Amino acid sequence: MAETLSMISLISFLAAGVFAILAVILWFVFRIPTVAGELSGRIAKKSIERMRKTIVDAATTAWGPVAVGWD
């Protein structure tokens, strides 16, 4: 009986290790950080800031400083 439980325990630990490795692989395959950023709005916020900076930089280089009114 103890040998059977020991074998079941060993198989369970090996399965847990395999599933842990699979979870890490799927984390990168499915790009989970990007999905989390999309759901939280962090990526959109960074994109908006990047667009605003591009607009301000373009206006500054063409005609000098320009007041943009986003503050």
Image (spheres, rainbow, N blue to C red):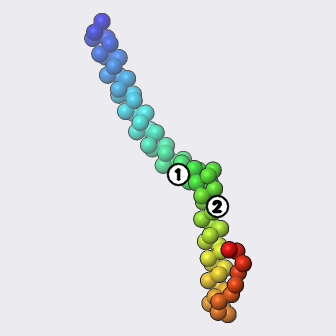
Residue 60 falls left or right of residue 10: right
Nearest the camera: 35 or 14?
35
Residue at the image position 44 percent from the left and 38 percent from the top: 22
Instruction: Name the amino acid, label 2.
Output: Ala
Residue 43 place in picture, x, y as percent = 60, 60
Badge 1 element: helix
Residue 45 place in picture, x, y as percent = 63, 63
The residue carrying pointer 1 sits among few (fewer than 14), some (14 to 19) or many (20 or more) residues within 10 Å by Cα, namely few
Residue 53 place in picture, x, y as percent = 62, 76
Q: Which residue is mark 2?
A: 44
On screen, residue 35 above or below 6: below
Q: Are marks 1 and 2 in contact (CB under 8 Å)?
A: no
On screen, residue 17 above or below 57: above
On screen, residue 1 above or below 9: above
Residue 5 falls left or right of residue 46: left
Residue 70 place in picture, x, y as percent = 70, 74
Residue 51 falls left or right of residue 16: right
Nearest the camera: 62 or 67?
67
Instruction: Name the amino acid, label 1.
Output: Pro
Of callouts 1 and 2, the N-terminal one: 1
Furthest residue toward right: 69
Furthest residue toward front: 71
Nearest the camera: 71 or 16?
71
To which quarter of the image does residue 20 belong? Answer: top left
Residue at the image position 40 percent from the left and 39 percent from the top: 21
Q: Which residue is mark 1?
A: 33
On screen, residue 35 above or below 43: above
Q: How many marks?
A: 2
Residue 58 falls left or right of residue 4: right
Residue at the image position 35 percent from the left and 17 percent from the top: 8
User: Which image quarter is the N terminus in?
Assistant: top left
